[in-house]
Amino acid sequence: MSIKEKILKGDFSDLLLNRNNAHYVHPSAVAKVFATIPFEAALKAYQALPSKNQVTVFSYLDTFLQKKIIKNFSPKKSEFILNELSSDDRMMFFSTLKSLEQTHFLSLLNEKNKDSVQSLLGYPKNSVARIMDTNIATTRFDITLAEAILEIRSKHTDDETTNVVFVVDSDNKLIDDIPIRRFVLNDPDKKVSDILDGFCPSLAISETKEDAVTKFKEYDRDVLPVVNAQNVLLGVVTIDDILDVAEQANTKEIQKIGGLEELDYPYVKTSFFSLLKKRASWLIILFLGEMLTATAMGYFDGEIQKAVVLALFVPLIISSGGNSGSQAATLIIRAMALKEIGLKDWWFVMRREILSGLSLGVVLGSIGLIRIAIWQNLHWYDYGQHWFLLAVTIFFSLIGIVMWGTLSGSMIPILLKRCKIDPATSSAPFVATLVDVTGLIIYFSIASIILKGTIL
């Protein structure tokens, strides 16, 4: 019987999170089970955990479940859990709360933790301060490794932040970092200064979470120190928190690219009406935009009446433009998110996308031209005596529309970034809607030029 099945039956025997127990289950696995069962069952199972394990599991729960559980606890139990959390997990929890909730739960913290949280809440929501752990293993450079080890043992517990020891001076200014393996592999009588390599990348307290993700990738570190403008060591950021940040950022970006507002909670935890609201706003905007398509077709009503055959290719024309624009927007938004390109690269992107659009337009236009020729000559459909001019119209229309689609899809994200707006809001549906409307204008304008004097 699985843990989930046992919990639902009220059997919590497998939730003894003791590594020496034969039925040991990792806290993250327990948290995953809690997220997939009714809240009442999850709450009972959580309450059945030993107090120490409750703190451990709490840090693995998603923010939605954390809030619901803590609100169902007595002030005394809530006080215990919040004060026992590591500083980064505590800070991440408080970052998800609204102002009134923050005030309530701040009152449950001891003075030290309260001062720390209030100080960090003063930093922007997207700064590394919000994910920083203030529990830091430090040592001096003028003592032996044996003395440093004894000092670390006396002051710190076994947690993720002690994987790296930071060397500081008397003013707590950062000098270097030392992986714990160097303490093990070097002679204990050596001085700390003897094993320094002089290279210690760090994060400024003012940097964003996205900057932190980039630096972790660049330097391939598990832990990075956070310093202020005077190089004073304030805390550390660990890789597990950075992975969470990267996942959240990617999720929000994908949601925006898909044409909806970012969700506050996971899909399965978001209420029906909240999900409806998040999706409806963009759909209404896009629908109003698509209404311009009818306006554009109404403007060319005369041409359509004279040559009804032109209407046959409207879906083909606008979908090709929308698809090419969506492709370009997706590529550019992702490239900007990965910092592969910046605002200064706009000319490079424009030249590249114009050439891409031209090439793709020629390919699609040729296929369209060949398709009309085959259908006409095999008598599968009669496009009339001017079928070749119609085929040429489709050829040049596709070139123009695909070029416009790729150009719009690539430039709009850059323009939004320049205006300090999230480029992901230039979602694929948004670009597709824009290109649909303008594509019709391009199509009928080219048709009126090529077919003038024949069927128009």
Image: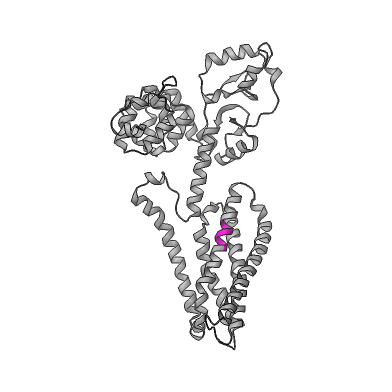
**What is the span of residues highlighted in magenta in the rendered image?**
324-329
State the image quarter where residue 57 is shown.
top left
Depth check: give the residue in front, 364 or 446. Answer: 364
Residue 430 visible from this viewpoint: yes
Please report the residue visible at 65 percent of the width from the left and 62 percent of the height from the top. Answer: 356
Residue 94 screen position, x and y as percent? 43, 34
Relative image position of residue 237 (x, y in whole percent): 55, 31
Of residue 288 and residue 118, the one placed in the foreground of this image is 288
Considering every residue shown, the one lying at the far front of the view is: 378
Residue for point 62% across, 66% down: 403
If the image is split into quadrants, where does the C terminus sit? bottom right
Instruction: Using the image, determine if residue 395 lies above or below residue 107.
Output: below
Q: Quadrant of the N terminus?
A: top left
Decide which of 181, 293 is in the foreground and name it.
181
Up-down relation of residue 380 to residue 404 (above or below) = below
Question: Which is nearer the eye, 364 or 120?
Answer: 364
Q: Quadrant of residue 26?
A: top left
Residue 258 to residue 87: above or below: below
